Image (cartoon, rainbow, N blue to C red):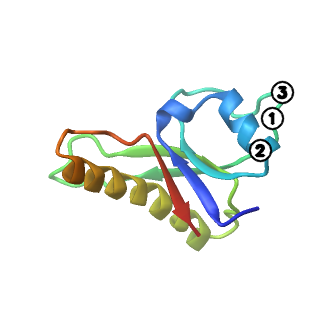
Amino acid sequence: MSRVISVCDREADMLSYIQDKQKHNERFVVRTKHSRALIEAKSKPVNVVYAQEKASKNVTEPLRWVLLTTEPINTLTQALHIVNIYTARWRESIRSDQETGCGAYLSLTTYLA
């Protein structure tokens, strides 16, 4: 596998996208869109990271992410690395918005591991 990891928002939570990535041995982190069974008949297994923001007085509804990935998640450190990869996607989107000045929104970012 290459060092490139495709980092995608919920729009990429499609079985065909995930199967294509797996078929070509491409690495990915995809935020899920739907609550559904994670095991699909024709897809290879993927790892799942569930991340939830800590409750606080300033947050009415904490963020909750379910992230699918090809990356190993055998330890807490590895799981936190997946969350960091996904949050880097948001930083890239904001920077792109500021650079273009037209509110362009990136739904796909690549990350070099």
Q: Earlier in the sequence, mark 2 or mark 1?
A: 2
* Real-space CA distance between mark 3 and mark 1, rounded to the nearest whole angstrom: 6 Å
**Between marks 2 and 1 in the image, the one whose residue lies nearer the viewer:** 2
**Image disc number at residue 41:** 3
Closer to the camera in the image, 90 or 105:
105
Determine which residue is flagged by label 1. 43
Residues tagged 3 and 1 counted as in contact (Cβ below 8 A): yes
The circle on residue 22 is 2
Q: Residues within 10 Å of mark 3 (few under 14, many from 20)?
A: few
Marked residue nearer the N-terminal end (2 or 3): 2
- Element under disc 2: helix
Q: Amino acid at mark 2?
A: Gln
Q: Amino acid at mark 3?
A: Ala
Identity of the residue furthest to the bottom in this view? 77
Q: Residue at x 42, y 54 (%)?
A: 89
Q: Amino acid at mark 1?
A: Ser
User: For the point 65% across and 70% down, which residue is it?
Assistant: 75
- Which quadrant holds the C terminus? bottom right
The numbered disc on residue 72 is: none
Q: Tags 2 and 1 in contact by the CB under 8 Å rule?
A: yes
Viewer-side label of 2, 3? 2
